[in-house]
Image: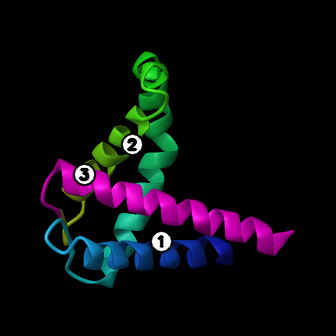
Amino acid sequence: MLGFFIRLVINAAILILISFVLPSGVIFDNFYSALVAALVLGILNALIKPIIVILTLPINILTLGIFTLFINGALFWLASTFIKGFNVSGFWAAFWAALIYSIFSALMSWMDNKVTK
């Protein structure tokens, strides 16, 4: 359970860093908003993303998986509509933010697997 909270705080910190990388595209009012955004993004990625990926499987196959990046951007943008204090200026800002967030999340998972082995 402690690992979940640590990962949540790290994901929120990654989101805050993304807001510095894309200052006009992604804006957080405070760290609490980033914490809630990390939680909502985790829930969306766990529950809704698999359904959308299955529904768009033919497009994903034709684009060799590139369309998944657009799904990530759309879910990032969708999360910003639910959370007060988390603003994304448009789809392309959400696309790039989701790409950066995915890269850092993958690196964090990879490092977690290396440490726990």
Bounds of the magenta segment: 88-117
What quarter of the picture does the N terminus occupy? Answer: bottom right
Q: How is the image coloured?
A: rainbow
Q: Is residue 2 left or right of residue 50?
A: right
Q: In 3D space, how far apart are the residues under numbered discs 3 and 2 (Cα atoms)?
A: 12 Å
When asked about the image quadrant of residue 14, the answer is bottom left
Residue at the outermost top position? 58
> Residue 77: where, in percent of width, then height?
24, 51
Q: Which mark is residue 84?
A: none
Nearer the camera: disc 1 or disc 2: 2
Point 35% across, 65% down: residue: 37
Please tell me whether residue 61 is drawn above or below residue 41 in the rendered image.
above
Which residue corresponds to mark 2? 69
> Residue 29: where, in percent of width, then height?
20, 80
Please tell me whether residue 60 is drawn above or below residue 32 in the rendered image.
above
Point 36% across, 78% down: residue: 17
Indicate yes or no whether the magenta region holds residue 30.
no
Indicate yes or no whether the magenta region holds residue 115.
yes
Which residue corresponds to mark 3? 77
Q: Name the residue type under label 1.
A: Asn
Which residue corresponds to mark 1? 11
Point 41% across, 66% down: residue: 38
Q: Is residue 54 left or right of residue 7?
A: left
> Residue 76: where, in percent of width, then height?
31, 53
Magenta-colored segment: predominant secondary structure:
helix
Please tell me whether residue 54 is drawn above or below residue 70 in the rendered image.
above
Q: Name the residue type under label 2.
A: Leu
As helix, strand or loop, the secondary structure at mark 1 comes to helix
Disc 2 packing (10 Å; few <14; some 14–19; many ≥20): some
Q: Looking at the image, tell me whether mark 3 or mark 2 is earlier in sequence order.
A: 2
When asked about the image quadrant of residue 96, the answer is bottom left
